[in-house]
Image (spheres, rainbow, N blue to C red):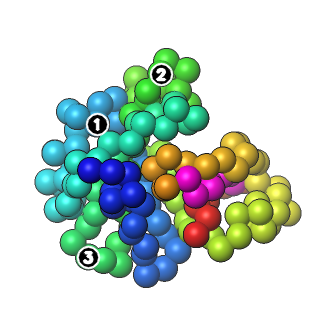
Amino acid sequence: MQIKDSIAATWAPQGNFHHIGFVVSSIDKTVKGMATSLDARWDGVIVHDPTQKVRVTFLESGNRGDPLFELIEPAAEDSPVHLAAERGGGVHHVCYLVDCLDAQLERCRSQRALLVRRSTPAAAFGGRRIAWVYTRNKLLIEYLER
């Protein structure tokens, strides 16, 4: 299956809440149990993103209005999620769709949020740009440009 056919490449929520990211030490060892627990569908696509040094896959709820559930596995020892995976993983971030990433990042700066990672094309989303922001409330948000 090609990336363009994956859930993440084609899925669009009814609102702007796109997905919840969850760190795991191994997608292969975790995905079937997570899909069963969430009563979700898995398309079998695992995407390696060398820029972010992770491998990711997405689970889709039977309810079209629900956000996706992303499993994130470190792909290198210097992956930003390596330590979290070693500590047992867990909820990592939430992701929202935005019409204009640059405008959203400007709004975040005006709220004194910390830009963690500048905008970059993401392998899992067909090259659409993403950026990471850490809010003053200690929430890690990924913004995905439509």
| Circle 1: element type | helix
Q: How far is mark 2 from mark 1, CA to CA?
A: 14 Å
The earlier-in-sequence mark between 2 and 3 is 3
Amino acid carrying label 1: it is Ile
Q: Which residue is drawn at 50% across and 46% down?
A: 123
Q: How far is mark 2 from mark 3, CA to CA?
A: 34 Å
Q: Mark 1 points at which residue?
A: 27
Q: Which of 103 and 44 is in front in this view?
A: 44
Amino acid carrying label 3: it is Asn
The residue segment tinted magenta is 127-135
Give the overall secondary structure of the magenta segment.
strand
Q: Can residue 138 be seen in this view?
A: no
Which one is closest to the eye, mark 2 or mark 3? 2
Outermost residue toward the bottom in this view: 14
Q: Residue 67: horizontal and vertical position, in percent?
A: 39, 67
Task: Give me the disc on residue 63.
Answer: 3
Query: For mark 3, does the 10 Å Cα neighbourhood hold few (<14), some (14 to 19), or many (20 or more) residues?
Result: few
Side of 98 where 6 appears, left or right: left
Q: Is residue 133 rendered magenta in the image?
A: yes
Amino acid carrying label 2: it is Ala
Q: Is residue 34 rendered magenta in the image?
A: no
Q: Which residue is drawn at 26% across and 76% down?
A: 63
Instruction: Report which quarter residue 97 is drawn in.
Output: bottom right
